[in-house]
Amino acid sequence: MQSGRCGSSLAVMAVIALISGCAGLPRHVDKPKSEALSNPEVTTLGRIVAQEQEGHTHLSGIRVLSSGEEVLADLIALADHAERTLDIQYYIIHQDASARLLLHHLRLAADRGVRVRVLVDDLNTAGEDRRFLHLSQRANVEVRVFNPFPGGRFATWSRLLASVGHIRRINHRMHNKLFVADNALAITGGRNIGDQYFTRDPLSNFIDLDVIAAGPIVPELSASFDAFWNSKFAYPIASVATPVDSEPAASTALDTAVSANANWLANELESGGVQLAWVPATVLADGPAKIASETSPEEEETIANNLEALMRSATKELIVISAYFVPGKDGIDMMRKLVDQGVSIRILTNSLASTDSPLAHTGYSRYRAPLLKMGVELSEVRPKLGQKRARFHPFRSSNASLHAKALVIDQRTVFIGSMNMDARSAHTNSELGLVMRSAEIARQVTSLLDDISADGSYRLQLVEQSDKIEWISGEPGSEKTWYTDPETTRLQRFTLKLLAPFAPEELL
């Protein structure tokens, strides 16, 4: 019996030694430097943009994309119309029906001779090396993983085990989302690549925001991509993954069904034009150094610094839409000063019932009462949207979860991007977004907020003369009130209360 226990222990130790012993990134990697297309005007997309931009010198073309189904169709349209280059940078690329469909179109583009560069953060690629390896073996395609784990790549637990000596580095992730075709048209915002982001999951889908961009802002986005692509922390997938021989079998046939109503971009590109609003716009982009822990937000200008300055500039109204909202003491102090100056503040975030990150919710929940006391309008998304959700269709019977990240300042300045209003986005992850100065775009984003607030959220308020919170939903006359987090169980609330002390805000 004793020898059996000893044998088991040795076996476990052998596995740990095997994983940890191999835990190290390759020192000498062949990864040629490359850059975005320098002359997009030679492509059809470039010529279309140049034609549309006439009379709009120094302005960028923008269209807000709120429908997930529409964004998937637009990404496919860009892949299908690209002639020279496609640059793809995402925090997550799932291996589900939507991702397989989009990657299929990337392969078709590569077969036409388009250079395809795919950069994906390594956090969520466990067990997917084989698929990314085969994609990279396609002619004209190169795949790199950003800030990779040093070993144990077959599962999340083995990666963490192999990374004991690399915790500080791997805690920093590339959270950017960007898709650029021929350095002429780009899509960026809050969505990753996967069914839940394109409202194609039968159980749960995300409410999100992206924009399609054209004009001088696109080369700025491409410059951000190049900085990450050529960074020392971007590794060719073949340099960190075990080689494979055979093509992986497709789990299901490609689901090519995309609503005809969502194909506006494909239809417009076929007709030789694209309808965009031409407005002043700026790229906000963290650099790879933030990932590498080579600088701190206090030493370098980051998106967090920029967005704090934008929020402080509000004189009348500040709207915050954030899936994960953990303002911290500094954020609360800033909002208190704005309220004292007469600024109206509206915040939309997830409820405990709708969030996909309950621990992040614990970081937020401690600030609800202080926000309400100072007069902030606070709403939380319900897991089931009401009937006024048309622009987010087709949610059908699936649950909803907020994933959008946006600011509207004084109904004239708008931020849409990847950054949540929390410590992880501010200090740990790299982020990307656009600031647009347009009353029309501000109206569109505010309208989205109004739609959700009207029939898809809980309105929070303090019980009279107390610090207790009540949640109210429904139309006037048919309202329903809760005195604990709505549509959650006692066990859920108790478990999170126990875990809260062990979840510091900087890690949420």
Image (cartoon, rainbow, N blue to C red):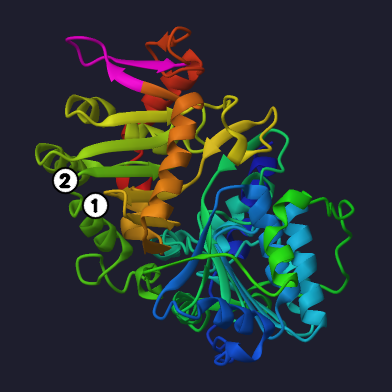
Front-most of residues 324 and 461: 461
Q: Is residue 461 magenta?
A: yes
Residue that badge 2 annotates:
334
Please state if 472 lies on the left or on the right of 218 as rendered: left
Q: Position of residue 12 (x, y in %)?
A: 63, 51
Q: Which residue is mark 1?
A: 311
Instruction: Give the crowd class for mark 1: few <14, some 14-19, many >=20 residues within 10 Å.
Output: many
The label nearer to you, 1 versus 2, is 1
Q: The residue tagged with tag 2: helix, strand or loop?
A: helix
Give me the residue at 79% from left, 73% from top: 107
Q: Secondary structure at mark 1?
A: helix
Q: Are marks 1 and 2 in contact (CB under 8 Å)?
A: yes
- Disc 1 residue type? Met
Q: Earlier in the sequence, mark 1 or mark 2?
A: 1
Q: Please give the name of the residue rendered at 37% of the width and 69% of the height, measured from the top-left corner.
A: 280
In the rendered image, residue 271, in percent from the top left (x then y), is placed at: 73, 71
Magenta range is 460-474
Q: CA distance from mark 1 to mark 2?
A: 9 Å
Q: Residue at x 44, y 77 (%)?
A: 56
